[in-house]
Image (spheres, rainbow, N blue to C red):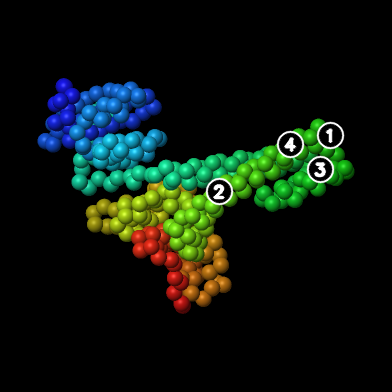
Amino acid sequence: MSNHNLKNDVAVLGIDLAKQSFQLHGVNCHGVTVLKKKLARKNLASFIVQLPVCIIGIEACSGANYWVRVLEKLGHTVRMIAPQFVKPFVKSNKNDAADAEAICEAVQRPSMRFVPAKSIEQQDIQSLHRIRSQVVARRTAQANQIRGLLMEYGLTIPQGISYIRKSIPLILEDAGNELTAMFRELLTDLYDEMVHLDRRIKTLETKLESLCTQKEDCQRLLSIPGVGLLSATAMVAAIGDISAFKNGRELAAWLGLVPRQHSTGGKPTLLGISKRGDTYLRTLLIHGGRTVARVANKHQDKRSAWVMQLEERRGKNISAVAVANKNARVAWALLSNKSTYQASAA
């Protein structure tokens, strides 16, 4: 098919993204296939320039946010779809051509839910969180290794990073614990590496604090009890455009903080929370909810009274998740109305 016909016919285009090979599937306004093409990465943008302004569907995957920015600059309307919503439209065997056709079909559904694209600033904040999370995991592994090695020499240290920091210098100074010179040298190296990881975490958190003070949305979220620096910045990085959610309930469901359903025959059956969406952000919100529940008896506001009553009826874990759910809804209200949290008197 000639480029002239393509410019006149393509109304919806599905692109199956990859590292180097991209499969395209286009249909006209009547749903008839008018384009099937495979392109190399370097040729994709130059080919899309030749097309008329159309709706382009892509899967939410690695590199998808970059291509959203590139394609939108060319004047197209780009929509990202979660992979699990594309899969039902794949016909027969899975391959790149079938995936591109499925994306093209899914993006045309009126009830389809799309993934909001992230800006470069959001990706920067999210990168800080991902790097910090990895460094924290490395520090935890380092502490566990130190504790395990010392057990072989008859020395025990309680769990917790703070105990490692306090105990290792004392162990190294104690000449009567029968540690060899070689192991003392190894232990010193392990401890120095853990100190280095502490410094890296502090540096990353300082950068997050700087970004948090510059963004009004982060300051609004910090006013919510149970939402701290990590939760506020991670939420801003994940959500982006709050108008993508109709209400706070949608945001809580998107974070996986609502019950999972398995209902049939008119009989509702609610299970545990769905755990969909961003695991990292959901974990932060639940940890914040656990903190709120732990200190609820020290406050006299209406929210704390509700948390205490809920904990008496359902226990600590369920009350922590309930607070996280409420915080997600409050966050939607604050970001939508551009306001700050106001506690209600009991």
Q: Is 107 rendered above or below residue 259?
A: above
Q: Secondary structure at mark 3?
A: helix
Q: Find residue 168 and report its horizontal and vertical position in percent.
A: 76, 45
Q: Nearer the viewer, mark 4 or mark 2?
A: 2
Q: Crowdedness of circle 1 by 10 Å Cα count: few (<14), some, many (20+)?
A: few
Q: Secondary structure at mark 1?
A: helix
Q: Residue 286 — which label?
A: none
Cβ atoms at labels 3 and 4 below 8 Å apart: no
Which circle's residue, 4 or 2, is located before the other in the chain? 4
Which circle's residue, 3 or 4, is located before the other in the chain? 3
Q: Secondary structure at mark 2?
A: helix
Distance between the alpha carbons at the discs numbered 4 and 2: 27 Å
Q: Residue 207 — which label?
A: 2
Between 17 and 155, the one lying in front of the other is 17
Residue drawn 75% across the image and 50% down it = 166
Distance between the alpha carbons at the discs numbered 1 and 4: 13 Å
Q: Amino acid at mark 1?
A: Ala
Distance between the alpha carbons at the discs numbered 1 and 2: 39 Å
Q: Find residue 67 and report its horizontal and vertical position in percent.
A: 34, 35
Q: Residue 181 — which label?
A: 1
Q: Crowdedness of circle 2 by 10 Å Cα count: few (<14), some, many (20+)?
A: few
